[in-house]
Image (cartoon, helix red, strand yellow):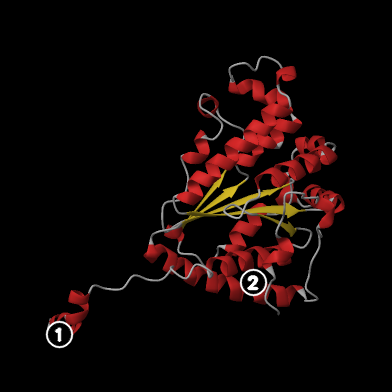
Amino acid sequence: MDKIKVDNYSTNKNFKITDYETFEDFGKSDKELKKELSKIRRELGEFQDTIYAHGKYSILVCLQGMDTAGKDSLIREVFKDFNVSGVEVHSFKVPTELELSHNYLWRHYLVLPAKGKFGVFNRTHYENVLVTRVHPEYILNEHIPGIHTVEDIDQKFWDKRFEQINDFERHLAENGTLIFKFFLNLSKEEQRQRLLRRLALKEKHWKFSPGDLKERKLWDEYQHCYEEAISNTTHEHAPWFAVPADNKKATRIIIASILLESLKKYKDIKEPMLSDKIMANLDSYEEQLQGE
């Protein structure tokens, strides 16, 4: 299979969801796609060891998408060959009372990856310009000075949030965090089929919520909010990628490939060398061990 072209999935300041495909299979069978992913993720896992040993960069992977876009299974499959000590996954649900007593970025700061590690955000700080924008009444729970009613939440409020998020990510990038943001571009029809499967298969019942149907009715509003959020927050130091999500196997290959190809461009990421003093005495260390 040909190497994935990262630029095919890059976004810009005029992001339109309809400009990007929702389905991809690269002309390959499911078996072939599964084999290709196995190869890429194994290489990515090996490179993670080098990043861990290098210890100067942290990697933040942000996953956003509509319900049923496949975020959970993607995380399981893409990072399967990682050393578990080198990757941490955090899923952000409805904010708790404690989280609401702080600013909206607080809970994300708490779980940022340490240098040498990958951090995966399953839903992210962008929920604060997506879900809360579609449901502005949620903002009132944040007890922000000057915001007393939904009518107080205007376009300037959202523009300020985009600015705050950009500042947050710029601060991370300037201090050694490599940021990758993925929008899983799911079609409305594929979401319908996946929701029907959740209803049809007993083992998937736990994934279904009537709230999924309520949110589905707001599909167009969410699409608009995604377009505006991505357009306002995609930067060279914190790029957004729009990845087709109707075929989960291809989605996983694309994201794993983007991570691997992008990280390989950092030529300074390499395993640290032993000091000259230690190198000069390797033979004596070996003799000591052999003599035991």
Q: Amino acid at mark 1?
A: Glu
On the image, the x and y values in percent for residue 271 come to 38, 71
How dense is the environment of label 1, judged by Cα within 10 Å: few (below 14), some, or many (20 and up)?
A: few
Q: Quadrant of the C terminus?
A: bottom left
Mark 2–mark 1 distance (CA, rounded to whole Å):
43 Å
Please give the count of numbered marks on the rendered protein. 2
Q: Amino acid at mark 2?
A: Leu
Residue situated in front as seen by the camera: 267 or 71: 267
Q: Residue at x 59, y 23 (%)?
A: 142
On the image, the x and y values in percent for residue 126 come to 64, 41
Secondary element type, mark 2: helix
Which residue position holds label 1?
287
Q: Is residue 140 left or right of residue 112?
A: right
| Disc 2 + disc 1, Cβ < 8 Å | no
Which residue position holds label 2?
37
On the image, the x and y values in percent for residue 187 come to 83, 53
Q: Residue at x 67, y 27 (%)?
A: 157
Residue situated in front as seen by the camera: 201 or 286: 286
Q: Residue at x 75, y 58 (%)?
A: 245
Q: Is residue 20 left or right of residue 64?
A: right
- Residue 133 falls in which quadrant of the image? top right
